[in-house]
Each structure stands twice: as C-alpha cells, then as structure tokens.
Image: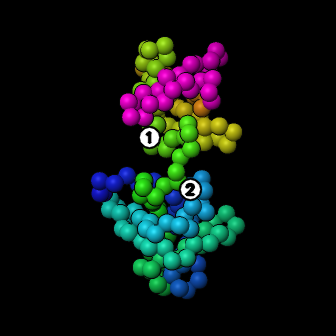
Amino acid sequence: MMDTEYFRIGVITEPHGVRGEVKVFPTTGDPEHLKGIKVLFLKSGEEMKALHPCTVRQQNDRLIMGFKEITDRNEAEKLRKAELYVDREDAIPLEEDEYYISDLIGLAVYENDEQIGTVRDVMETGANDVYVIARTDGSELLLPAIRQCILKVDVAGGRMDVSVMEGL
C-alpha cells in the first residue's frame, strides 16, 4: 500500500445493468457523503487502484455506483466482493468527541494513571459504541463509550483515560 491511510466505505456485491455499474453495500455511517468524492480506491491484493465515480445513487440499503474505469458488465462482474476505500482526507469530518475507529485501536487505556490495557476493537451497537479492552491481566473488558466511562481520549498521545463503573 501507499503511505496514505484508507477507510473502508463499502463492499461491491454484484453488477447492476450492462454499463459497468455495481451495487455496493455501504460500511460507512453516511453514504450520502460518497456523492461528493472524486476518487475511491479498490483494494486489489495489497495494492489500491484508484477509481473515479461518475454515478452514485441510493437503492434501498445499497448504493448503485458507476466508475469511469469500468464500462461494461463483464468488467463489473470481476469486482464482486471487492472492497472500496476512501483516503483519510476525504473521510467524513469528525464532530467534537468523535474518533475514527482505526485511531482508537491500540490506544493504551489508563484508570487512575495505571495502565489497565489497550483498545483492541470497537463494537458499534447503535445506542453507543462499546470499546473492547484487552486488559494487562489477559482478560477482556467491554467498556461503553459514554462520558461516565471515557474521561479523556488523546489520539496523538496514544492514551485513553477511563473510569470502569462497578459491575463491568
């Protein structure tokens, strides 16, 4: 891969029509944001191939996308199950106290200035995210991403300060 960081925004499920359009299952929080993107990247092995969207429209829970580089159904057929990515620069801008999941993974987690583990994963549950913490003792802690539990996140410093509520 190149030096740039990418975020997965969707997975191509199947061709749509005969002109090279594809159906995409979106894995991004706001598929409408993709309508303004000039370049997406198709993951092919370890390489990222640039694709230039020329059509993007919603159809039920899928997007129908056309690309300048894909002009017929045969080419589109080869893209089944391929993943589409966006460059970090083109990702959805974050609001205050929002973070990209990839920035949270690997953060050292501290309670009362003592490291208790690292963020291993983030589960998106709908109501609030849940941080999966690999504890230093080998156990796992599921910590809801709420103000009472997440006191401070310092992505640049590689640290998250938390308060583990009783019963967790």
Quadrant (top left, top right, bottom left, bottom right) of the N terminus: bottom left
Instruction: Give residue 23's position: percent from left, percent from top.
Output: 58, 71
Q: Which residue is mark 1?
A: 103
Instruction: Give residue 147's position: percent from left, percent from top.
Output: 62, 27
- Which amino acid type is shown beneath numbered disc 2? Thr
Residue at left 56%, top 19%? 163
Q: Find the magenta span and give its range.
A: 146-168
Question: As displayed, is residue 6 above or below residue 120?
Answer: below
* Residue 134 visible in the shown view: no
Q: Which residue is mark 2?
A: 27
Question: As displayed, is residue 140 above or below residue 42?
Answer: above
Instruction: Give residue 137's position: percent from left, percent from top.
Output: 44, 18
Q: Nearer the viewer, mark 1 or mark 2?
A: 1
Residue at left 51%, top 41%? 99
Decide which of 129, 43 is in the foreground and name it: 129
Q: Earlier in the sequence, mark 1 or mark 2?
A: 2
Disc 1 and disc 2 in contact, CB within 8 angstroms: no
Secondary structure at badge 2 equals loop
